[in-house]
Amino acid sequence: QWLHNKSRLEIYGPGTMKASAYTIYNEQGGELIIHGGVFTTTYSGLYPCVIYNTGGTCTIEGGEFDSPGLTFMNLNGAQMTINGGNIKTSGVSDSYAIAAIQKNTDVTLNGGRIEGVYVVNGANMTITDGTIVNKHKFYAVYSGRDGSYYDYGTVTIYGGYFCGAEEY
């Protein structure tokens, strides 16, 4: 029901991938490039990701991505660049579409529409453009840490449009 990438995987849309767990698991050393398509997961447990990027590199050129929770999870030194696409979190009221967790994990947003970003524990995110909204109860961009023993996440913003939820 899902793809496990250990080397190089390039996907061209149109087309649809749907899984009940991770849609794509991008392992350390894996290179994932997506040029379009529709990707969803229906899993509602811990980390119901469309892309679980653990130490790999990933480039998103476009597409539709939807998950009940963290749609893109980046950790363990993962590198992700997003140049376009619609990344959302349907069916959940307390999540972010993109998470960057742990030191040496870097995410660059150059465009697209994203329903919230979460950067913690020493991860880095650079935002140059795009629309980042959070229709739920949280911030459009959250940078912090999970517990007092972790480093704060770092977000550098050069441009884009941002809108968080109006009420808690």
Image (cartoon, rainbow, N blue to C red):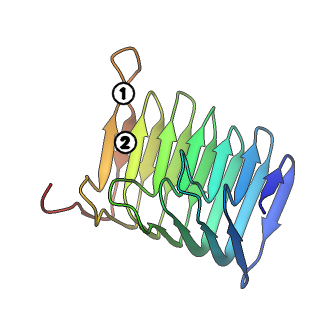
At horizontal 38% and vertical 64% (from top left) the residue drawn is: 115
Q: Which residue is mark 1?
A: 152
Q: Is residue 137 left or right of residue 102?
A: left
In what element is the residue under mark 2? strand
Residue 85: image location, x then y, percent: 53, 73
Disc 2 from disc 1: Cα separation: 10 Å
Q: Residue furthest left?
A: 167
Residue 59 higher or lower than 25, as above or below: below
Residue 14 image-quadrant placement:
bottom right
Could you say whether the residue bearing mark 1 is in a helix, strand or loop?
loop
According to the image, label 2 marks what residue? Answer: 155
Give the residue type that dot 1 points to. Tyr
Q: On residue 86, which mark appears? A: none
The spot of residue 141 in percent (x, y) is 31, 51
Label 2 CA crowd tier, 10 Å (few <14, some 14–19, many 20+): many
Q: Position of residue 6 (x, y in %)?
A: 85, 46
Name the residue type under label 2. Answer: Val
Which picture quadrant has residue 140? bottom left
Q: Residue furthest bottom?
A: 14
What residue is shown at x 53% (from left), y 44% (from top)? 46
Q: Nearer the viewer, residue 168 or 107?
A: 168
The residue under the point 30% across, 62% down is: 134
